[in-house]
Image (cartoon, rainbow, N blue to C red):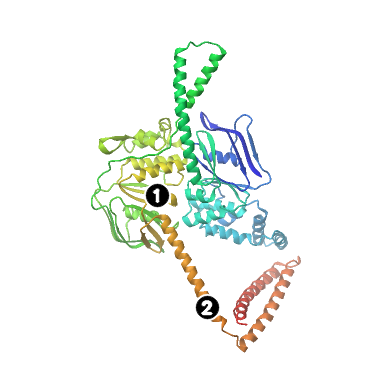
C-alpha cells in the first residue's frame, strides 16, 4: 500500500532552486532517511511531505493516503506555555488519549454524572493503560516531572516531549526532523528499537550514522536539486553512492570532450539560421551546462602549522566540583599529553559541559587545582551560538577572527579557502549570516573556532544539526589535526572514528578513564549489565533448588487455606464495588468512599496473593 506519492514536485525560494521535478513514493513499512547538505532543502522537503509547505511545478501531484494517521516532528516544536508536561502529552485527537484527558478534567470538576460518563467511555475504549504508557515513554526520554510547565522546558526538553507525544499516539506514518538531537546514547538505542518495528512507516532526517544503519530500509539523497534513492542500509548507500559518483565522473570527462568539440564548431561556423544549425546550437548550451557541473566528494586534509605545545599542557590535580546535591567530579586527576584525543561521555544532566569549563578554568573547582600550560591555545566550540553576529556577511564573520591560517612549509590558507573546504562556495560567502540555515550557522561557528588556530580543541556536541557531508569533512579535518582534542558527542560513529580513549562521567562525582573506543565502552557496559542479570538468575535458581526440598508445616497449610478464602471474598467485594460505580444515583461522597475501599481491597489482595504464591511453591 502506498502511503505517499509525489510527482513532478518543485520548490524554490527566489532564484534558489531547492529541488526540481522530483518524484517519490513511500509504501507501508518502509523506513526512509533523507540525506543532503545543510541549506539544500531537507527540512523544506519534510514540510512538503507533511503537507505544511506548498508545492510547485507543472502537472505536480501530492497524494497522501487518507486512511492513515500521520505525525510530524519539527526541529522546533511548539507547546502551550501554560500547560503541564502531562497535559501537553494528553493534548491529542487520539480517542483513547482524549478519553483519559476528559476523565482527568471530570475528576477536577466534581460532576458525578460527567465522571460516570467518562468512566464508561474509558471502559468501552479499553484505555486504562494509556496513562501508564504515556508516563513510561516520557520516562524513557528522561522527562520525569509531569507537573512541570512547558514554559520552563529547555529546547531539548521540548524536542523530547514532542517526540514522546508522537510515539504515544502510535501513528501509521511518522516524519522526523533530527529525532536523535538532545538524546543521550541510552535514549537513542531505545528509540532505535522502537522505530525498527515492522508496522511503522518512517521518513526522517538524521545525521546519526549508526541509527541510519540499524533502522533504515532506504536512503534518499537530495543532491543538486535531484533525488537519488538507494535500497539498503547506510553502508549500502555509501558503496552505491561511490559507484554513482564514479560513473558521473566518467560521463563528465566524455561530456567535456564533446563540449570542446562543439565549442570549436560554434567558433568556426557561421550562425546560420537553418533548423539544423539552431538545433545544434541549442544542444551545445545543454552540453555546456552538463560539462560545467561539479562532481565533488567533499574530502579535506589540511596540515596546519599550529602554535607549539610545550611539555606542560593541561593538568587536573584532585579537583572536585558540586552544585547542591549534584556532584560533577570528586578528586579527579589527569595530565594531558601531546596529540591526546579524548571523548567525554555520560547521561544528560550529569555535568559534561560543566566538567569542560572546569578544565578550561572558566569555572573554579571547589577543591584541587587546574594548571594550563603557557603555550596552550584553546579553541572551544560550544552548543550555544546566540552570540553569532547575524548582520554581517559570512566571509566577514570569519575575517573577524583572522584573514588566514598558517600551513606547513610557509603556506597560508585564506578565510575564503577555508570556507570553500567546509562547503561554503564563494557566492554563499557573500550572503548574510541571518540567511543561513541552522546547520550552516553551526558550521560557520565551528570555522570561527578553527580560524583561531588552536592547539587544544574542545568540541561540545559538534555534530548537532550538521549534515552527513559536513560531518565527513569535519572528520577528515580532525583526523589530520595534530593538537590535543577533547570531544563530547552522542554521535557514536563520530566518536569511534575520532577518539582513542574516554572520560566517563558516571554520576555522583565519579569520572572513569577508559582506554578504548566509544563502542568498546558501550559493549563492555552491556556485558557488565548482562553478567549482573546472569548472576541474579543463578542466585534465584539456587534459591529455587533449595526450596524444592522444603515442605509446608501444618500451620502453613492452614494459612494457605485461609488465604484462598480471604482472596475469594475480596474478589467478590471488588466486583460489587465496580458494579456500584454504574449506579447514577451515587453522590460524590459515596463515590469517594467506594474508591477508598476499592484501593484498600487491591492492596490487601496484592499482599495476600504474594503470600499465597510463596506458600503454594511448597504445597
In the picture, which quadrant includes the N terminus? top right
Q: In this figure, which residue is indicated by the disc labeled 1?
A: 497
Rendered location of residue 182, percent (x, y): 48, 51
Label 2: element kind: helix
Rendered location of residue 437, percent (x, y): 47, 39
- Along the line of sight, the residue nearer the viewer: 273 or 318: 273
The answer for how far apart the CA atoms under marks 2 and 1 are is 46 Å
Label 1: element kind: helix
The residue located at (44%, 31%) in the rendering is 294
Where 423 sits versus 144, above or below? above
Say whether residue 446 is left or right of residue 214: left
The residue located at (55%, 39%) in the rendering is 45
Rendered location of residue 509, percent (x, y): 38, 63
Residue sitting farthest toward the bottom: 554
Where 595 sits versus 275, above or below? below
Say whether residue 157 is left or right of residue 601: left
Quarter of the rendering containing residue 510: bottom left
Say whether residue 201 is left or right of residue 464: right
Where 393 sits versus 359, above or below? above
Quarter of the rendering containing residue 6: top right
The reply to whether residue 39 is in sight is no
Q: Residues within 10 Å of mark 1 (few under 14, many from 20)?
A: some
Q: Residues within 10 Å of mark 2 (few under 14, many from 20)?
A: few
Say whether residue 444 is left or right of residue 606: left
The residue located at (51%, 48%) in the rendering is 212
Rendered location of residue 136, percent (x, y): 56, 60
Where 549 sits versus 88, above or below? below
- Along the line of sight, the residue nearer the viewer: 104 or 98: 98
Q: Earlier in the sequence, mark 2 or mark 1?
A: 1
The image's mark for residue 543 is 2
Amino acid at each position: 500500500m502506498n502511503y505517499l506519492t509525489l510527482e513532478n514536485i518543485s520548490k524554490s525560494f527566489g532564484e534558489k532552486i531547492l529541488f526540481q521535478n522530483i518524484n517519490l513514493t513511500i509504501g507501508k513499512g518502509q523506513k526512509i532517511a533523507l540525506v543532503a547538505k545543510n541549506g539544500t532543502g531537507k527540512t523544506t522537503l519534510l514540510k512538503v511531505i507533511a503537507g505544511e509547505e506548498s508545492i510547485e511545478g507543472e502537472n505536480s501531484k501530492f497524494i497522501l493516503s487518507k486512511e492513515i494517521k500521520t505525525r510530524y516532528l519539527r526541529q522546533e516544536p511548539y507547546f502551550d506555555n501554560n500547560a503541564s508536561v502531562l497535559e501537553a502529552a494528553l493534548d491529542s485527537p487520539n480517542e483513547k488519549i482524549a478519553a483519559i484527558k476528559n476523565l482527568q478534567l471530570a475528576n477536577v470538576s466534581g460532576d458525578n454524572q460527567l465522571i460516570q460518563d467518562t468512566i464508561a467511555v474509558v471502559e468501552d475504549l479499553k484505555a486504562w493503560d494509556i496513562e501508564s504508557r504515556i508516563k513510561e515513554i516520557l520516562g524513557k526520554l528522561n522527562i520525569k516531572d509531569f507537573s512541570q510547565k512547558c514554559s520552563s522546558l529547555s529546547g531539548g526538553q521540548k524536542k523530547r516531549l514532542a517526540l514522546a507525544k508522537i510515539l504515544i499516539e502510535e501513528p501509521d506514518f511518522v516524519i522526523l526532523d533530527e529525532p536523535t538531537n538532545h538524546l543521550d546514547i541510552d535514549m537513542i538505542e531505545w528509540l532505535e528499537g522502537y522505530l525498527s518495528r515492522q508496522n511503522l512507516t518512517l521518513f526522517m532526517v538524521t545525521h546519526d550514522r549508526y541509527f541510519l544503519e540499524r533502522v533504515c530500509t532506504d536512503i534518499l539523497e537530495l543532491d543538486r536539486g535531484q533525488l537519488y534513492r538507494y535500497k539498503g542500509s547506510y553502508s549500502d548507500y555509501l558503496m552505491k553512492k561511490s559507484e554513482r559518483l564514479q560513473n558521473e565522473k566518467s560521463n563528465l570527462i566524455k561530456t567535456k570532450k564533446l563540449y570542446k568539440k562543439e565549442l570549436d564548431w560554434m567558433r568556426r561556423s557561421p550562425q546560420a539560421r537553418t533548423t539544423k544549425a539552431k538545433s545544434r546550437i541549442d544542444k551545445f548550451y545543454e552540453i555546456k551546462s552538463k560539462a560545467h557541473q561539479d562532481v565533488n566528494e567533499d574530502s579535506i586534509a589540511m596540515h596546519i602549522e599550529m602554535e607549539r605545545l610545550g611539555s606542560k599542557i593541561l593538568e587536573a590535580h584532585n579537583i572536585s566540583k558540586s552544585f547542591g546535591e549534584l556532584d560533577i567530579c570528586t578528586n579527579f586527576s589527569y595530565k594531558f599529553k601531546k596529540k591526546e584525543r579524548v571523548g567525554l561521555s555520560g547521561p544528560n544532566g550529569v555535568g559534561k559541559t560543566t566538567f569542560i569549563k572546569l578544565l578550561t578554568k572558566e569555572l573554579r573547582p571547589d577543591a584541587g587545582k587546574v594548571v594550563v600550560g603557557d603555550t596552550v591555545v584553546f579553541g572551544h566550540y560550544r552548543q550555544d551560538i546566540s552570540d553569532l553576529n547575524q548582520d554581517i556577511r559570512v566571509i566577514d564573520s570569519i575575517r573577524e577572527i583572522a584573514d588566514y591560517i598558517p600551513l606547513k612549509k610557509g603556506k597560508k590558507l585564506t578565510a575564503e579557502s577555508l570556507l570553500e573546504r567546509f562547503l561554503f562556495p564563494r557566492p554563499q560567502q557573500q550572503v548574510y549570516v541571518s540567511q543561513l540555515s541552522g546547520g550552516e550557522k553551526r558550521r560557520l561557528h565551528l570555522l570561527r573556532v578553527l580560524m583561531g588556530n588552536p592547539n587544544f580543541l574542545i568540541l561540545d556536541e559538534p555534530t548537532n544539526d550538521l549534515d552527513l557531508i559536513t560531518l565527513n569533512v569535519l572528520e577528515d579535518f580532525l583526523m589530520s589535526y595534530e593538537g590535543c582534542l577533547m570531544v563530547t558527542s552522542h554521535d557514536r560513529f563520530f566518536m569511534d572514528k575520532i577518539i582513542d580513549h574516554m572520560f566517563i562521567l558516571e554520576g555522583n562525582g565519579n569520572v572513569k578513564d577508559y582506554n578504548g573506543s566509544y563502542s568498546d565502552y558501550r559493549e563492555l557496559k552491556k556485558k557488565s549489565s548482562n553478567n549482573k542479570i546472569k548472576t541474579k538468575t543463578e542466585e534465584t535458581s539456587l534459591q529455587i533448588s533449595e526450596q524444592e526440598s522444603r515442605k509446608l508445616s501444618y500451620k502453613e497449610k492452614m494459612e494457605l487455606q485461609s488465604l484462598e478464602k480471604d482472596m475469594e471474598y475480596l474478589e467478590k467485594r471488588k466486583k460489587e464495588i465496580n458494579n456500584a460505580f454504574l449506579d447514577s444515583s451515587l453522590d460524590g461522597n459515596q463515590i469517594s468512599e467506594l474508591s477508598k475501599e476499592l484501593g484498600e481491597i487491591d492492596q490487601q489482595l496484592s499482599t495476600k496473593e504474594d503470600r499465597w504464591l510463596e506458600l503454594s511453591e511448597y504445597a
